[in-house]
Image: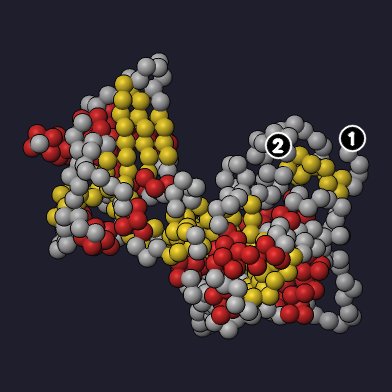
Amino acid sequence: MARGDSQFVCQSCGAVHAKWAGQCSDCGSWNTLVEEVAAAPLGTQAKPRKAGRRGGLELLPLAGESGEPPRHQSGVAEFDRVCGGGVVPGSALLVGGDPGIGKSTLLLQAVAQLAGSGAKTVYVSGEEAIDQVRSRARRLGLSDRPVALASETSVENILDGLKSEKPDIAVIDSVQTLWTDQLAAAPGTVAQVRACAQELVRFAKKSGCAIVLVGHVTKDGQIAGPRVVEHMVDAVLYFEGDRSHQFRILRAVKNRFGPTDEIGVFEMGDAGLREVENPSALFLDDRGDPTPGSAVFAGMEGTRPVLTEIQALVAASPLGTPRRTVVGWDSGRLSMVLAVLEARCGLSFGGRDVYLNVAGGLKIGEPAADLAVAAAIVSSALDAPIPADAVVFGEISLSGDIRAVGRNEARLKEAAKLGFAQALAPMSASEGASPVKVRGLAGVTDLVTCISAWRQEE
């Protein structure tokens, strides 16, 4: 039985329960409910109102002029791009990623560049000692930058130090290690993470210091402890990447001061992270001769066109239920594309396994990738390679029609810049002048006809 002043909090989603249960009813996770003392949020004690004093709420008209917020330019162009042009003073950022993916390296490089440009920066590590941070800085060639270091986990001590130091930007690595003595819960629990993050965000808004919080990622790929932290901060950035590849992707999933679909691409090396100015060339660097099942997708990541290779393999299945394996794309959307190809083109996948992979580890969520996925699948099923100088993009509807997508001109210009000469695209992309030859397709049947014609030409 729980005491009257206790509650059970899910460590996965932050849901509060009156009693313990094996499974969280909100997110479905098992064995994640932990008993915590129900305490009032920090700083919420009611203060007596002075007699005759009116409310402190100041109302302003909607009409008015407000300029763009000032920003701290870190000098790391890819990081600034994802932040929307730089770090806004007084904002709170949450950076998440898998352990060892390079979050600390990225942020140390960013604050070192900021310190070199005159900004006052502080780096607080709750997981590493000062000597470890200095060792990383020497390896990155940043040991001469005027960055103030500290190793502390008590949020009260951290806030006292920040108030006396008055930095422009402070990095807290990581939020899961912080604790406050006003709560009895252990560090890393939802109550501690929520309370500590709230105090740091409140300090950022009052002082104008930009706070960057580092968050761990769970096995499900979510920032641990809490979605509540994501609601508190102004921007949430995910640092993604496959350890078998050298590049890393910084992706914005929430940003109150910039676009939420922007990415920054970095390459991991011995001297730290290096910015990649042309991601398309990196993703297509290892392409060989044209083979069946390979299609180049001309996509958009934020304001930047990015070309990447989509690979598909269609093979006879020895199982009663064929496999559908997807890496880097939505498995539900793959099922839709296969159903459209079966219903509208007469292709059968009932007895065949279908494997789909986005080369290089990039994750694609754009509907414009439908046509490139279908082209790779049809190419593999018909054993007909797509020409090496062709790119593909377009959205497929359930009727089999190929619908128009946005930013056609930017996609085609990026393809021409990398040496591609033709494109399979919706009919709207073929209108007007284009740097490459555009084959406008009205439906998926046109796609199958085009790939079949390439097979006969060989």
**Where does the C terminus fall, quadrant-wise?**
top left
Asked whether the viewer can see residue 232, the reply is no
The image quadrant of residue 110 is bottom right
Colour scheme shown: secondary structure
The residue shown at (18%, 50%) is 389
Q: Residues within 10 Å of mark 2 (few under 14, many from 20)?
A: many
Amino acid type assigned to the residue bearing label 2 in the image: Cys
The residue shown at (77%, 71%) is 159
Residue 18 in the image: state x and y as whole percent.
81, 40
Q: Which residue is mark 1?
A: 1
Amino acid type assigned to the residue bearing label 1 in the image: Met
Where 18 falls versus 317 (above or below)? below
Q: Residues within 10 Å of mark 1 (few under 14, many from 20)?
A: few
In this picture, residue 39 sits left or right of residue 280: right
Residue 408 in the image: state x and y as whole percent.
26, 58
Q: Are marks 1 and 2 in contact (CB under 8 Å)?
A: no
The residue shown at (58%, 49%) is 98
- Which one is nearer the viewer's eye here, 129 or 348? 129
In this picture, residue 358 sits left or right of residue 6: left
Which residue reaches farthest left? 457
Residue 248 in the image: state x and y as whole percent.
47, 55
Q: Give the Cα distance between marks 1 and 2.
A: 17 Å
The residue shown at (14%, 63%) is 433
**Where does the N terminus fall, quadrant-wise?**
top right
Q: For numbered disc 2, what is the local secondary structure?
A: loop
Count of numbered marks: 2
Where 455 falls versus 81 (above or below)? above
Q: For numbered disc 1, what is the local secondary structure?
A: loop
Q: Which residue is mark 2?
A: 24
- Which one is nearer the viewer's eye here, 405 or 97? 97
The image quadrant of residue 28 is top right
In this picture, residue 120 sits left or right of residue 384: right
